[in-house]
Amino acid sequence: MSAKLLIKTCPTCGSDKIKRVVRDVTRNYKGKTYFVPALEFYECPNCGEKVYDRDAMLKIEANSPAYHKAEMPADA
Ligand SMILES: [Zn+2]
């Protein structure tokens, strides 16, 4: 097993209600919509913050039209 990022509190609002979810995610990159199936990430029910760990980022990148560029946008 690889080490998982463990998040207990939301980095944005500090809520301890943040939890891991698995969800099909539709994202947008420069007007292009793309789909990331069964993505695992943290979501805060209090403020809506989403936190992606390394595995999630890799999965997003693998599905993103931005993947082939050298740099990922900071907010991707
Ligand atoms: Zn929050």
Image (tube, helix red, strand yellow):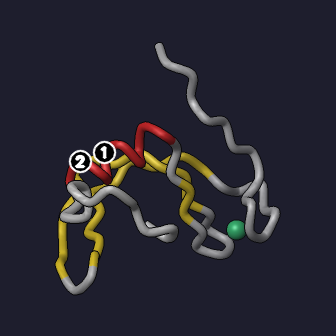
The amino acid pointed to by label 2 is Ala
Residue 36 placement, left or right of 46: left
> Secondary structure under badge 2?
helix
Q: Residues within 10 Å of mark 2 (few under 14, many from 20)?
A: few
Residue found 19% across the figure and 64% down from its top: 65
Mark 1 C-beta to ligand 1 under 8 Å? no
State the residue at coordinates (40%, 61%). 72
Q: Is residue 23 left or right of residue 62?
A: right
Examine the rendered structure and indicate whether residue 37 appears above or below residue 71: above
Most foreground residue, 29 or 14: 29
At label 1, the amino acid type is: Lys
When the figure is inspected, residue 38 is found, relative to residue 11, above or below; the finding is above
Quarter of the image where ligand 1 sits: bottom right
Residue underneath mark 1: 59
- Which residue of the protein is positioned furthest toward the right in this rendering? 14
Expressed as whole percent of the image width and height from the top left, the position of residue 56 reads 41, 45
Return the x and y of residue 32 as percentages of the image width and height.
17, 79
Outermost residue toward the top?
Answer: 1
From the image, tell me which residue sits under label 2. 62
- The Cα–Cα distance between marks 1 and 2, rounded to whole angstroms, is 5 Å
Residue 37 drawn above or below residue 15: above
Which disc, if any, is residue 48? none
Give yes or no for contact between labels 1 and 2 (Cβ–Cβ under 8 Å).
yes
| Image position, residue 52 (x, y; %) | 50, 52
Residue 68 image position (x, y, % from top left)? 21, 55
**Callout 1 secondary element:** helix
Image vertical order of residue 73 relative to residue 4, above or below? below
Q: Residue furthest bottom?
A: 31
